[in-house]
Image (cartoon, rainbow, N blue to C red):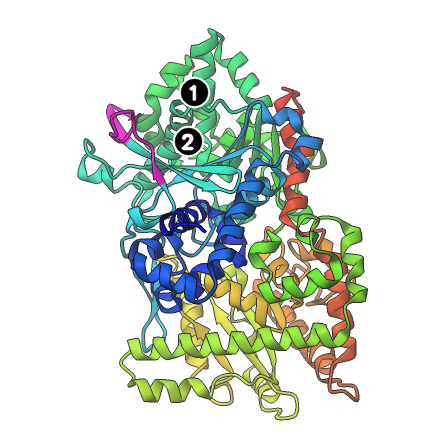
Amino acid sequence: METPSDLQTKLWSLALNLWWTWHPEVTSLFRDLDPELWEVTHHNPVAFLKAVDSQNLEERARAHNLSSRILAAARRLESYLRSDNTWCARRAGMLKARPIAYFSAEFGLHEALPLYSGGLGVLAGDHLKSASDLDLPIVGVGLLYARGYFTQRIDEDGWQSEEFGRTDITSLPLERVSDTDGRPVLVEIRSGSDIIRAGIWKARVGRCQLVLLDTDVEGNSPDQRQITQRLYWGDQSTRILQEIVLGVGGLQALRHLGIRPGVYHLNEGHSAFALLEATRMEMEENGCSFGEASHRIGTRSVFTTHTPVPAGHDRFPVAMVTEHLGWMRDALGIDEATFLALGREDATDTERFCMTALALRLAHRANGVAAVHGDVSRRMWAKLWPEREVSAIPIGHVTNGVHTRSWMAPQLERALERHLGADWTRRTSHRDLWQHMDKVSAAEIWDNHRLLKADLINFVRGRFTRQEERRGTASDEAASRASDLLDPEALTLGFARRFATYKRAALIFRDHERLSRLFSDTDRPLQIVFAGKAHPRDDGGKALIQEIFRITKSDPFRGRIVFIEDYDINVARHLVQGVDVWVNNPVRPEEACGTSGMKAALNGVLNLSVLDGWWAEAYDGKNGFVIDSPGPHGDPEIQDARDHDALLSALENEVIPLFFDRDESGMPAAWIERVRWAFMTLAWRYSADRMVMDYARTRYLPAAMGNSCE
């Protein structure tokens, strides 16, 4: 028999490794111990264990026969961490000698850890999780945002406002790095004539680790303490300081921890200063010139760009860069013109220093995140290589993927286990695995989907009730309004993402009369669930939210179009698991990838998208639907009209008829076959395991061997 203290020790060992974020059988343990407290603590097992009464925990564990499940979960984690029968050991063992340092401004691992704003961060989180499953030695490097990204509030008129809370860092699954006397370790980062101090925190992500820097420490000025408080907040002065802390401070933190990276991977340009610091360290350690050191570091560096929209790339005034990094220029032994040229997009731009240009010049391997995006990136950054044809620009692509166990509904995962085998989640990137989907009956596919859809509707109604109560609606009236929301039998569309204007969230509403006819059809009902945040300074994105919010209050859309506040990983999880169709209609070719559609596909949800990002290479005519229109046209208004017509035509002529065409048993047989084919053609190809293996084979291994691709 385990003693009570042993049981609690096992729970703490599970809570302090973010392995639990992709193992629902572990999170269910905490939920079953105290369902109400689990909700109150925002699904965070560390906060849960700090809040729970230890005696009550022991009693509930015994009463609900949870002790054996807790011990079994702890054994699985221990076995996972110790196993050497891994993909990396078999295929990329040389990477074990020196890890990959993976720099990112955000990491989206779970809703309880507010270190992300959207797709970039969630991609970084999935990258670490799959690296852990593959046993690839990656160390994530980021910033600890005590106030996170904002909580979204929508007022009675539909306008977004932002609220910043404060996270109790001591209740997160993090460990502060301290010296032998128990004092927090601080790294010192130069910025002009100032010194910025940063504490170091670590998180365990399965077999990998995440290192986070925090400037809210003693010895810093009040302004310096605010640098890492909030994600993507403040003016350019704050942003450049964040990026100096991330890149320069991140490398110094790794050095303090005794981590000497064999490969540097920059996830977007925010961390490009890391390569300057790595070059400086190389010069200092080996007495070489800037040219030699930058070449050595460049051959070991990988840069992933995610943004096909010019406005999405950080550009700082030259004077600001000189002010904060003049010391770095001196340390590198180069003159001002040479230093500034590293961040110059072309010879004529003498006013701005571009972080993406810096990363592209220093890293010898660069890639976009889908085939189309690779081509767009080559064209966008062609000025950096004026002597080359666009096709010869050294920017390739590695198409993104998503972490299967993090995004697939647990009940669907369990159902597939019966047909794909008990170990199927370790083979998600194997094409042949998914061919066994033909063993899953149509009835089982449909029944599982209907259950997930019911879960989504219950979730939406609960969120709507709380939103209405916050706005002052009486509880009984709010609950009454919520009960009228959404029809389990209706075709349910999902649209959830960052509300940037180019993503065109309101495209479907261009012709209200035509759309009203679809929503008024009682025999073939249609409904849409929206969610997403606009950047606090993006009034255009906020106006789109307001437009949609106002439409939700008008007939015939009332109760059939819902906007869910405060989009986060938890909301995303429910939506991609429970809608029938995932809609994506950005301006082409401005969608870098669109990983939310991959998450939907993992749950038997069909995509309806323009041929951009991942869908341009994924769609085969049978695994979803396409918004097919000519273009792109030089006049955005004409293109919007074309795409709107194509969207509604696809709904009217393909999506709706196929969904409501039922056989004698009441199931949409042709629809289910399309879902089955989507699993077979998409699930393996767009898994994060495949993505990380692609990086290992085509980027990390050549970089670790010091092979230049120039």
Q: Amino acid at mark 2?
A: Gly
Residue 565 or 209: which is nearer the viewer? 209
Does residue 191 belong to the magenta stretch?
yes
Q: Which mark is residue 119?
A: none
Distance, label 1 to label 2, CA atoms, is: 22 Å
- Up/down of 461 relative to 375, above or below: below
Percent x, y for residue 347? 51, 28
Percent x, y for residue 412? 64, 66
* 438 lies left or right of 445: right
Disc 2, SS: helix
Q: Which mark is residue 337?
A: 1
Q: What is the span of residues highlighted in magenta in the rendered image? A: 175-197
Percent x, y for residue 561? 50, 80
The quarter of the rendered structure image containing the C terminus is top right
Q: Residue furthest front?
A: 1
Sequence-earlier tag: 1 or 2: 2
Does residue 229 belong to the magenta stretch?
no
- Up/down of 562 relative to 531, above or below: below
Is residue 263 in sight in this rendering? yes
